[in-house]
Amino acid sequence: MRRSALFIALLSAAVLAACNGGYFGVDSDDNGNGGGSGATSDAQGLWTGTTSDRYTFALLVTPTNDVWGLSYDESANTAFRLFRGTGALTGKNFTGTGKTYASGASGTVTTGTVTGSVTTASAFDGNLPNNLTFTTNFNSQYNTAAPLSDYAGTWEGRDSSGARLVVTLDGGGRITATSTVPGKTDPCAINGALSAGASSKNYTILNLSFGGESGCAANVASQSMQGVGVRVADAAATAQPLLLLEATNNGQTAGWFAYARRRAVATGS
């Protein structure tokens, strides 16, 4: 009888522990960080790699499974495509639904899905709309938020209209920028701000207002947009940091996106 009672007590303790996540529960040592080491995959993170049409690809999945994917090519001066949506993870399989925003002054918008397989803190490979695939690796910078002061400076790159973009950021995240659609002479004025995103995560919340100048792309002129901004330091410290800006309007009927490198500060000046 004593042995039977002891067995029942041990079995009850084991079942209780399992129900509370001690055996088969969610990742217990992740603490909300991308890159936890438990058995359950975690899709959140900054994932960087390439697409099957040979663009550099940066995929941000936030703690609430908002999805932002930007395709660009610095060597070709091209910010090419944006995907914005929301997703969910089942085991290691991720499915996100949303919209794709094309580059160009009109910025064609189509609906689509992103699917893929996630290995926590390692790899996220999958499929994009238009029969494209992507291969990415986890960027550990996601787990260390850059302060807004690290965004300060002048950044130069290209936006989704094909325009040369010049962005100036102060230490508090305030943005003043200009871009000009090719063939126009009146620069588009862009103003806005970055604010801190999720605690300890390396992305910011982006709010922008576009002017009505002739140099503004038709799909963004006089629009207000919201999105994300991400600062990515060069792993080898041989290049200036990269800034990725991605935004849509409230109805998600128009999008704007860009990449830029921070202008080097002259020494001895």
Image (cartoon, helix red, strand yellow):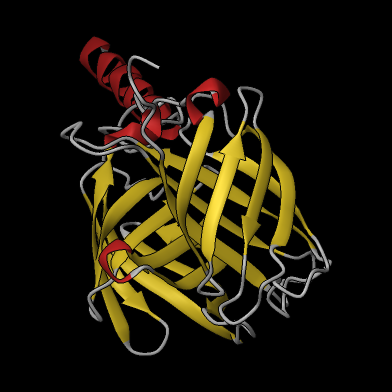
Callout count: 0
The image shows residue 128, relative to residue 16, as above or below, that is below
Quadrant housing the N terminus: top left
Give whichever of 181, 141 is nearer the camera: 181
Give whichever of 89, 158 is nearer the camera: 158
| Residue at screen point 20% across, 35% down | 235
| Residue at screen point 38% across, 72% down | 115
The image shows residue 209, relative to residue 196, as above or below, that is below
Give whichever of 179, 223 is nearer the camera: 179
Give whichever of 110, 20 is nearer the camera: 110
The image shows residue 212, relative to residue 200, as above or below, that is below
Answer with left or right where residue 243 lies relative to residue 74: right
* View extreme (top): residue: 2
* View extreme (front): residue: 269
Question: Visible in this render: residue 25?
Answer: no
The image shows residue 164, relative to residue 130, as above or below, that is above
Q: Position of residue 35 (x, y in %)?
A: 30, 36
Quadrant housing the C terminus: top left
| Residue at screen point 37% across, 46% down | 46
Question: Visible in this render: residue 41?
Answer: yes
Q: Position of residue 154 (x, y in %)?
A: 51, 38
Q: Position of residue 103 (x, y in %)?
A: 51, 79
| Residue at screen point 50% across, 60% down | 258
Answer with left or right where residue 65 lies relative to residue 249: left
Where residue 11 sits, quadrant-wise, is top left
Where residue 97 sits, quadrant-wise, is bottom right
